[in-house]
Amino acid sequence: MWPTFFNFTTMKQIAATCLLLCSTLLSAQGIHIEPPNWWTDMPGYSVELLIHGQHDIASVTVQGQGVKVMTDSPANNPHYRYVTLSISPEAEPQDLILAIDYAGRHRSKKVNYELKARDPLIHANMGLSARDQLYLVTPDRFVNGDTQNDVVRGMKERAVNRQDDYSRHGGDLSGLASQLDYIQSLGTTAVWPMPILENNMHGQSYHGYAITDHYAVDPRFGGLESYQLLADQLHQRGMKLVMDMVLNHTGSMHHLFQDPPDSNWFNAWPLSSNKGDEQTLSLRSSHKYQGIYDPYASKDDVRRFTDGWFVPSMTDLNGRDAHCAQWLIQNSLWWIETVGVDAFRVDTYFYPDQAFMRQWTAAIHAVYPEFFVFSESWTHDAHSQAYFLNSQPALDAGADFLIYHALKSVMEEPASWTTGPTKLYAALAADYLYPEQAKDMVIFLDNHDEGRFMGKIDGNMKMYKVGLGLLYALRGMPCLYYGTEIGYDAVNDHGAMRQDMLGGFPGDQGSAFRGEGLTETQQEALAYVRQLGALRHQETLIGTGKLMQWAPDGGAYALAWYDDKEVLIVIINVDETDRQWDMSRFSELGIDQGQSARSLLDEKVMTIESSQHLPAQSIRWLKITKD
């Protein structure tokens, strides 16, 4: 039975408007099918269709060679039907005919459903590795490549206002694609745009995390064609595309929430508000993830975390429902197969049901073994990070918040027994807890949810160089947030931190892409990031050799990549005074006094002496070739 808090009449009226915008709506027949197509020769050889019609659906049959209906089940909402097609391994690409019979006197409908041939070429670049360098972009704030799609008829939010940090600014995927030369010049090998799927909310959804149609690229970003073109252009350059996946929640205007197949699809609580987009059946998540592994946790606390809504305008999906879980899995496979996505970053990974997340991640790798999945697991300590990595055996890696917090301490706190370089030393030592994932963790100094790195260090260019140098020297994949390379410095405000990229919009006075109108500080920052990107690309020992670190001496700290032929040493000093580093500490790597070393940042050749002078707030890269 449907709970009394679902008002079908109201929801159907709202859903009718939403469905007109859905890319998968077969408008002529009034039939909506998800996924909108499938492929022959997909592992599993079956697909569960979610079919929505204008009237109560009684049954569905199929006509096609090598395809039959395995199951035909009603949803609690009689306008929906769950239909599983069995696809023979010998089935050829074809247009199936689905015959949809309505209950009562309503006329039956026949619609085409396409089975496509798979294209193996779009998967040639699949996966990420420790040698990759990522570039994170907020598409709405990067480049406005097509002003014609700034305002789209039928979308709820129609204003573009660059003066408002939380309004749409007009950036799109064609604009992102137009600056791939610039992005690649930074050393980038993989581009990670924040979510690009439709967010048809009334406002403040420029960020992409309030999805309202899982099978449609937001038309203000240019639609599916622009996304496919971006993927193609990246692949032609040997670069990769990371898709930002949101499995925990949808926007409250999502057509499946406005007219759900079943109340079990969403975690619903007693009605708490009724304010436009914030019409919710929600309890806010407690955000206390510790309950998942806490042996003393109350069941209510766990439920409040996993089933609570992230924010009032984002409905909480229930992965424990078998049909919802299958829908999410198939949607993820559909994007990989349709666009040639190379990796997923999974938003709020530990908020959904963790059994479902294991099922989802395993299902992705069952079809695409080389595909790379990394999680956003915003933890604050090593044991928490270890739990969420090790409890998900199919997960390749995570965004490394432990290293992030350690780097913050190095850059922002005075050196002590527990802070500064010591915190980084301890964070790396914790890699023993997750040795398989550690080498591929995604590391960063700032991102779309945290204040800009340059702002946190009060514009200190010396510390900027130390921080970025460490980022590119550490194990894992460095991720640069757009604008960090020109010293953007906004903190404490999400809208401001996601500011427009200089030169990406009409009327900009200057351009980071063309190197015009930049301050001396911006020019210096950009040149340094390019130097680091090239250096990391050239020094293949990083991420492939063995890694060693040395206990800090005050604000001085060193690590080294090494093999039998060469050693790459990185030494920092974050103190406000000069220091000396005892070079004999490197003797176990076969480095002795009198050997020659090349300083990679300035290309000078030097002789190893008993101690290395470290200027205040500095970083040194030394390369030694063994005899």
Image (cartoon, grey):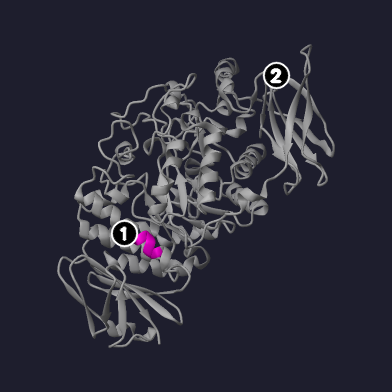
- The residue closer to the viewer here, 178 or 226, is 178
Q: Determine the main secondary structure of the stretch shown in magenta.
A: helix
Q: Identify the element where label 1 is drawn.
A: helix
- The residue closer to the viewer here, 199 or 10, is 199
Q: Position of residue 143 (x, y in %)?
A: 38, 37
- The residue closer to the viewer here, 484 or 157, is 484
Which quadrant would residue 66 be assigned to in this image? top right
Which quadrant would residue 609 be assigned to in this image? bottom left
Q: State whether residue 504 is above or below residue 156.
A: below
Q: Which residues are magenta?
A: 531-536
- Distance between mark 1 and mark 2 Cα atoms: 56 Å
Residue 345 is left or right of residue 123, and the answer is left
Q: Amino acid at mark 1?
A: Leu
Q: Is residue 571 visible?
A: yes
- Mark seen at residue 468: 1
Q: Give the residue drawn at x 18%, y 70%.
A: 615
Q: Position of residue 307 (x, y in %)?
A: 51, 39
Q: Answer whether residue 532 is magenta in the image.
A: yes
Q: Answer whether residue 160 is magenta in the image.
A: no
Q: Give the residue drawn at x 75%, y 47%.
A: 41
